[in-house]
Image: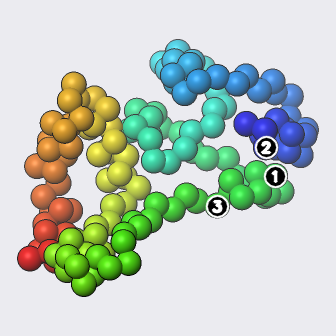
Amino acid sequence: MEAVENDVIPAYDLNLELKASSTAGMLAEVERLYSGEEPLVFMPWVPHPMNQDYEYHFLEDPKDARGAFDEPAKISTVVNGDLESNDPAAYAFMKNYTLTEDQLNALMDEITESDDEIEGSKAWLKQNRSVVDPWVKAAK
């Protein structure tokens, strides 16, 4: 928020007022404007279930006003250094575990929409056997 207010808005001489809010507050306003087909600018991030709900695009930042926030996020798996020797199956599973941005968004959406996070995860796993099977095969 600070980078947008102090760097992005001034860099592009935007006639905008930044309104800080909670994620829930932001998404309520996005829903209101989006469903009314009104123009809006908001600060989404990936991964998040909102990416399944709204069609939008990220704005270019040729002046690099967002700095480090211009770089895509990366999610990494971190394991105990002894995992490969202590539990080769778990290590093989984790080494082969990978999700695309769309897959991760869909998984998060399934979990969020479910009344039970475990059941939401199981539902996603059942629907995405082709994604999960290589992880399981590696562990075998």
**Residue type beneath disc 3:** Glu
Q: Nearer the viewer, mark 2 or mark 1?
A: 2
Residue visible at 82% across and 35% down? 5
Which secondary structure, mark 2?
helix
Instruction: In the displayed orientation, state which residue is furthest to the bottom.
Output: 85
On screen, residue 31 versus residue 137, left or right, reads: right
**Residue on which the image places disc 2:** 3
In the rendered image, residue 134, in percent from the top left (x then y), is placed at 17, 71
126 or 96, nearer to the observer: 96
Which residue has dot 3 on it?
Answer: 71
Q: CA distance from mark 3 to mark 1?
A: 12 Å
Q: Kindly indicate whether the residue at mark 3 contacts the one at mark 2 (C-beta within 8 angstroms).
A: no
Precedes in sequence: disc 3 or disc 1: 1
Distance from the alpha carbon under mark 2 to that under mark 1: 8 Å
Question: Dot 1: few (<14), some (14–19), or many (≥20) neighbours within 10 Å?
Answer: some
Label 2 and label 3: CA atoms lie apart by 14 Å
Residue 12 seen in the current view: no
Relative to 91, residue 51 above or below:
above
Q: Amino acid at mark 2?
A: Ala
Question: Residue 58, how many percent across, how many down?
Answer: 61, 47
The image quadrant where one finds the N terminus is: top right
- Quick check: can you spot residue 122? yes
Q: Dot 1 corresponds to which residue?
A: 65
- Expressed as whole percent of the image width and height from the top left, the position of residue 85 reads 24, 84
- Residue shown at 64%/61% (left/top)? 71
